Amino acid sequence: MMSGPLNVESKPAQTIAPGNHLIAAFSGSKGPTLIVIGGIHGNEVGGVIAMQAVTAKLSDHSEPLKGRIYFLAGNTRALARGVRFIDADLNRSWTPKNLSSAGCRTFLSTSEGTELTELSELLDGILVTAADEVYVLDLHSTSAKGAPFATVGDTLRNRRFAQKFPVSILLGIEEQLEGTLLEYLNNAGAVTLGFEGGQHQEIETFANHEALIWAGLHFTGISPQANRLAAHREQLGRSRSGRFFEVRYRHAINADDQFHMDPGYNNFDPVRSGQVLARDKSGPITANESGLLLMPLYQKLGEDGFFIGRRVAPFWLAFSAFLRRIGVQNLVPILPGVRREPNEPDTLIVNTRIARLFPLQVFHLLGFRRRRWVGDKLIVSRRRHDSTSPFWRKN
């Protein structure tokens, strides 16, 4: 038993007002920190409901905790209206420009700008006081049916944590998107895991979110509860469709495209190259390659029409980890046509006229998954804190 009462602050769902992001905070003895965030999109309420269910049970919990737990509501103003966002997608807003000391004045004056300011101050306060590893679970849901799955930025620390959960794991989706919350927290040093728990409003989705939180408390060592783990693993593993996947293609859209997904598609449905998947004002949209369909869009708001992924063989994951552990990523800039970005040590500039024989998949193996083109130059970046935590130095 703990030497003193459990420290808990909580607000039930119905009383969370705009700007009140803290659902609950628990602290025990010295140990890691777990941050759970739900509702970063205001129409995805499953994570918030799950956090409140866990809060009620933890408040009556007599088992000692080793570490800290923070349950946070994301876009509180959009949650109050039941919409994905009000002025801008909060999960595309965590950019260096918006987070700089000057910030983007136009954005910061919006509803999501206010949310970002409030959340970033709260998160920074949690991170700066961490004395051990920091873990983050970001709870989402989708407009299409299908198996729940995890999304992780491709670092070895993220992979190790994700592999503890009995769900499919998707690599590379965060590197396809700009300004996600998890990218911001990953670059700050946290171990991060996104979770798509199922379709919006489905009871099974809420159950999946709650099971993930309890499993996360166990796998971080904050609240072992070994007697309950089997039930949580069973809940999460009911519709497991595979293990590791990687995103191969993202179909980006905007409001003027008049995008409509063809009906009947679910997450992880197999698709063939050339198969018609959706339509917009220009006509039919076909799959650019064969693979597995991910997150087809069946809602009005959103910037991602669908993704296409494929399975990753365990050999390549093991080989990738081996290459990174021996530091091969640090040798890439000595190759002809490859140089390091002077102000960004985790970014490479590749002259494709010279390094044209250097396959893109090699960059993926070494963690360089984010890419953009500037003329004939390919800019590739990898996540910071791949194998070591900046919080360990505080011990």
Image (tube, helix red, strand yellow):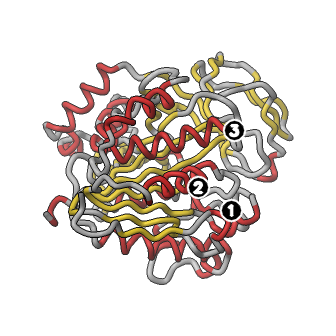
Look at mark 1 in the image and give the residue it sits on: 79
Residue 304 falls in which quadrant of the image?
top right
Depth check, mark 1 against mark 2: the one in front is 2
Going 65% across and 74% down the picture, which residue do you hit? 18
Q: Amino acid at mark 3?
A: Glu
Q: N-terminal of the two: label 3 or label 2?
A: 2
The crowding category of the residue bearing disc 3, from other C-alpha atoms within 10 Å (few below 14, some 14 to 19, many at least 20), is few
Q: N-terminal of the two: label 1 or label 2?
A: 2
Q: Which element is circle 3 on?
A: loop
Q: Amino acid at mark 2?
A: Val
CB atoms of marks 1 and 2 within 8 Å: yes
Going 41% across and 68% down the picture, which residue do you hit? 8
In this view of the protein, can residue 349 be seen by the observer? Answer: no
Q: Quote the CA–CA distance across marks 3 and 1.
A: 17 Å
CB atoms of marks 3 and 2 within 8 Å: no
Query: At which x and y percent is residue 24?
Result: 47, 65
Look at mark 3 in the image and give the residue it sits on: 202
- Between 55 and 212, which is closer to the camera in this rendering? 55
Look at mark 2 in the image and give the residue it sits on: 48
The crowding category of the residue bearing disc 2, from other C-alpha atoms within 10 Å (few below 14, some 14 to 19, many at least 20), is many
Q: N-terminal of the two: label 3 or label 1?
A: 1
In this view of the protein, can residue 40 be seen by the observer? Answer: yes
Q: Quote the CA–CA distance across marks 3 and 2.
A: 14 Å
- Between 209 and 344, which is closer to the camera in this rendering? 209
Going 34% across and 55% down the picture, which residue do you hit? 62
